[in-house]
Image (cartoon, rainbow, N blue to C red):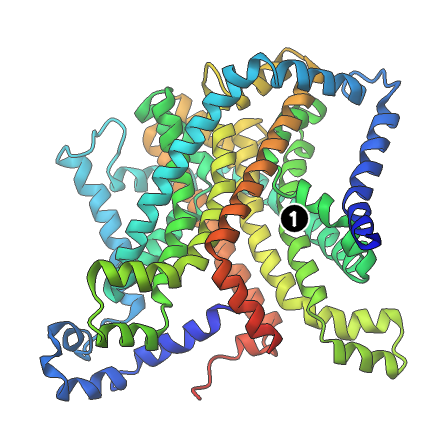
Amino acid sequence: MEGKPARSTSALDRIPGGPGGTVDAGAAPDGPAPSARSGGRRIPQSVLGLLGLVGLVLLIEILPRIGVLPRRYFPPSSEIGSALLDQVGRAEFWQAVGDTLQGWALGLAIAAVAGVVLGILIGSSRLTLELTASTIEFLRPIPSVALIPIAVLLFGTDIESKLLLVVYASFWQVLIQVLYGVQDVDPVAHDTARAYGLGRWARVRYLTWPTALPYVMTGLRLAAAVALILAVTSELVIGNPGLGTLLATAQSSGAIAATYAIVVVTGILGVLVNVGFRAVERRALSWHASQRGDIPV
Amino acid sequence: MTDVLRRVGMTLGLPIVLFAAWWFASAGSTDFFFPPLSRILDSLVEEWFGPRLAADVLPSLLRLTAGYLVAAVGSVALGVLIGTSRTVRGLLEPVLEFFRAIPPPVLVPIFMLIFGIGDGMKIIVIAFGCMWPILLNTVEGVRAVDSVLSDTARTYGITGAARLRRLVLPSASPQIFAGLRQGLSVAIILMVISELFAAENGLGFAVVQAQRSFAIAETWAGVLMLGLLGFLLALLFRVVENRQLAWYHGLRRAQRSS
């Protein structure tokens, strides 16, 4: 919503012979800064990004080797890389990845279904919205890690304790977005649907759901990221099997490079989850104005 | 008058019902894991609002504040620097996205290794974990400064500190606050997590201590205390945000109603 005007300005910014470039010739005394910016030979963003990543890897390779960072704690990237390759060749690594992803997916699915169903039910009338507002506002900011002791007491290291944390954290992300979305239904469209005799279910199906879908997708994307964090956290702290436990074992046995390698894996998983959900969002909303790209006006 | 009564009823109705349900459902409970709510509340008042407030809650809050402030100030400053240059932004964005994608708690074992287990480690963990959402949102907000405003400011010769104070920071502030809000919830999570591994005081430490010694009522009370803290901090944040962004919310309302 707020991103939209921003996107169009940056698109304008990107046109090589855009306003900046043409005005520049006459406005030379303005100083060197704008002329340098509109020099025309801009490196594309993707190349710059790749350069940044390569730079990071090189930095982590060099700094420990020349002693700027203590090598005991900061292994160079080549060592992290070979530890990563070593991990990738092991069955228990893939088992851990599978365990983490299983808890993540299951928790996210439960949270998504519960969030969408409850959101549509609560959002469908003003009365339920007003009645539940204070309770939601109170429960939502409770940090999910507060539930760790209870989860341990009740479930130990079974998958339920992981699910409890994952579901609690991601449920609110979905619910809040669905509530926004349901309230966004165009009143004219709503009255029209009623006037044409659409029943309750038909209105949810053809009016509320399409209106709320962009919000649902945003909620799902946020929830997916939070769910992964909580899945790994729960493994790390409670000790459910998964990447978190693998990390704890590597750390306590002093395998520093392997510890870093697993951190890198969790980061890659996080990026994949983000990218994946953005792609799903684009597909599911290909009909929606926000996804059809900016048509220069 | 009836309107006020109605609103009070709406706000307090469901919480009272839920509270009463918990109270009566657990009143005669002999289940080891679900003690009566009255006992949990006793423990909350006696322990958490009593000696533990200074011994455990305060150190936690101080570490949280220190880490959060360091992250907020550092990330906004860094974000403004990165956001104003296209090239720097292009170079760093994927790197920052990667760091943000790492679940912050996995860094605790590594930081423990490097910085030991003292207060410093916990503050660094909190700061390092909650800086990414603040940083990325600041970068995004600075990038999206309205180009007409930006050119106007340049034409009028507003540069340097004045430009930063009057143009860049205000126009990025809605985004910055969104980042600060995300950062705050991450900071609370890390405050607890960092105390679970190694600590001699703190909320997270005390709750886990209670859980390990099977002091069930006290564990539940600790969970309530953490929840209360999260709620109060979110409330405090909203008060500050509403004050700072009053102009922005007003603008949005005006735009929407027109």
Q: Would you place residue A202 above or below residue B106 in this image?
A: below
Q: Please tell me how crowded label 1 is: few (under 14), some (14-19), or many (20+) other residues with Cα within 10 Å.
A: many
Badge 1: chain ID: A
**Foreground pick, B211 / B113:** B211
**Is residue B29 among the parts visible in the rendering?**
yes
Q: Is residue A136 above or below residue A142?
A: below
Q: Is residue A202 left or right of residue A240?
A: right
The residue lying toward the viewer, choosing from A180 and A290, is A180
The percent position of residue A196, horizontal first and vertical second, equals: 87, 84
User: Could you say whether the residue bearing mark 1 is in a helix, strand or loop?
Assistant: helix
Quadrant that contains the C terminus of chain A:
bottom left
- Under mark 1, the amino acid is Trp
**Residue A254 against residue B125 in the figure, above or below:** above
Residue at the image position 31 percent from the left and 78 percent from the top: A14
Q: Which residue has dot 1 on it?
A: A172
* Residue at the outermost front position: B1
At x 37% / y 77%, what residue is drawn?
A9
Question: Hey, which quadrant is residue B42 in on the image?
Answer: top right
Residue A37 image point, x, y percent: 19, 74
Residue B69 appears left or right of A236: left
Horizontal relation, residue A241 to residue B180: left or right = right
In the rendered view, would you say B147 is above or below A153?
below
The image shows residue B130 at horizontal and vertical percentages of 42, 42
